[in-house]
Image: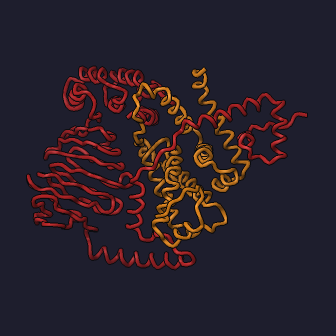
Chain colours: A red, B orange
Amino acid sequence: MFTRHVSRRLAAFIDGELPPPKARQAEVHLGRCALCQADREQIRFGMEILEHLPSVGAPEAIWASIEAACRESPSRKPPAAHRWRLAFAATLVLTLVGAAYWRVAHPFGVRWEVVRLAGSPAVDAKHIRGVGRIGAGEWIETDSVSRASVKVGQIGSVEIAPNTRVRVVTARAGEHRLALERGEIRARIYAPPRLFFVDIRSGTAVDLGCEYVLNTDEDGSGLLRVTKGWVSFQWKGRESLVPAGASCQTRALLGPGIPYFDDASETLKQALEHFSFEEGQSDALSIILGESRVRDTLTLWHLLSRAEVTDRERVYDRIAVLAPVPAGVSREQALKLDPETLRLWKEELAWTW
Amino acid sequence: MVSLSDREVSAEIIKSCRSGDREALRALYDLYKDRVYSISLYFFHCDQAAASDVTQQVFLKLMTRIGQFRGDAEFSTWLYRLVVNTCMDTARRRKSYVEISDRLVMEVFAGPGSPEEDYSRAQMASSVRAAVSALPPKFRIAVLLRYFEDLSYVQMAKALHCSMGTVASRLSRGHKILAERLRDWVGTKG
């Protein structure tokens, strides 16, 4: 007599997790059923192939963000056994009373610590000698010999370079936002993504857990250079994703250009500047494609959606030569700029970035 | 300084955590962070931001809910139940935010070796990652839990809120789908 197929129990059979009677039953069935034998080999292979999935270390920034969240929300502290309900209720009441008081006493929210590093930086035109405070709506300004450091809530710090003018726009736990009018800042943020933003005239740098340097002139032309993690550089619905080791220029009225790795060839960088901000895109594109290495698929992936329709095929072909096109990415969908296809492709290419 | 070499956590550490001992919490975090992060990373298609977010949420929930852990189950089972819930909840929320999920980013994992040296290995790993990413979420989380944490079927059933039969079925089907998707690669290896 032929028993029922055992395909659905095969993982448990292979792992030795079936109870003895069921394991014997499966063994007998497997001795006779070629279909289940084939399934067993497939499942075994599916298990073995996972050895190619490496364990990845959690970034250090996660613990810092957990501590920051605990500091900002005392109710996250672990409750003592048997008293947690009472403690929670008390915390809730105190938080509500505290929040109401804070609203009245501090209409602009929290104020961040400012430390003088050199010269005499000023907060709202008042020079600070040692440590000062800055809140939403206030400006910090440095002259040619001054530098300062701003502690951004509990999530990181920003160093203000000489000849810089920057305003705190928002200083809340859920949104930390600066507006850089001119000069240069170096941001070090240890928080979950999208909690820290810097606006300049030609774009917004959105922190995705990173360290970076951003400079701009008063017109809005500038440069973003990322040293750790990722930054999303956005402007009018367009986005440039900039990983560590890469930079992205931006221009007034045009917004962020296409990101490139700092170790790319100078020829590629010059061609990219022409492509992003000047006339003669077709010639520049030929140079960019010719100069690209595997790692420069960062640049090419962004180019795909910014090149003229007629040039898109050239960009696709060059990426395909440099890195294998993953399953799930079709030429047709990629050339149509299908968002899901582009996302999938980016995720695969990013392993080489 | 608390240091743990055993994969299971002592009752003393749990007790210290309940009373708010930050060092004990840090020890727990150090013990589990890489496995929680790896599971989240591969669950969310190698999206580093999502994995960091989920890892943070899991340990914050751990801090606030450790009082509810009664000790009648293994700590790791309880913790991975938090991981499963957080991953599935986050995945459900992200479904309705296509614009955000289209902006997913990934950390640079490239090793120091040249691309030529690592090409074959990288291609293989890339195929496996893609195949795991393409699994339906319930199969994906089961496969990842089994692989990274080596939980027993009883523990997995508790973490996944389902029967052992369902665990066996999801693992069988998940691994079979993986094998089918990776068949081309096997063919080229001869």
In the figure, A91 relative to A254: above or below?
A: below
User: Where residue B125 appears, x then y in whole percent?
Assistant: 51, 33
Q: How many discs mark residues in the rendered view?
A: 0
At horizontal 46% and vertical 79% (from top left) the residue drawn is A90
At horizontal 64% and vertical 60% (from top left) the residue drawn is B74
At horizontal 35% and vertical 33% (from top left) the residue drawn is A298
Left or right side of A295 for A275: left
- Whether residue B153 is visible: yes
| Quadrant in the picture for residue A73 | bottom left
Left or right side of A335 for A265: left
In the figure, A67 relative to B33: above or below?
A: below
Query: Most extreme residue toward the right, as rendered?
Result: A1
- Whether residue B95 is visible: no
At horizontal 60% and vertical 34% (from top left) the residue drawn is A49
User: Where residue A6 appears, x then y in whole percent?
Assistant: 78, 38
User: Where residue B12 appears, x then y in whole percent?
Assistant: 57, 68
In the figure, B19 relative to A204: above or below?
A: below
User: Where residue A342 appears, x then y in whole percent?
Assistant: 42, 33
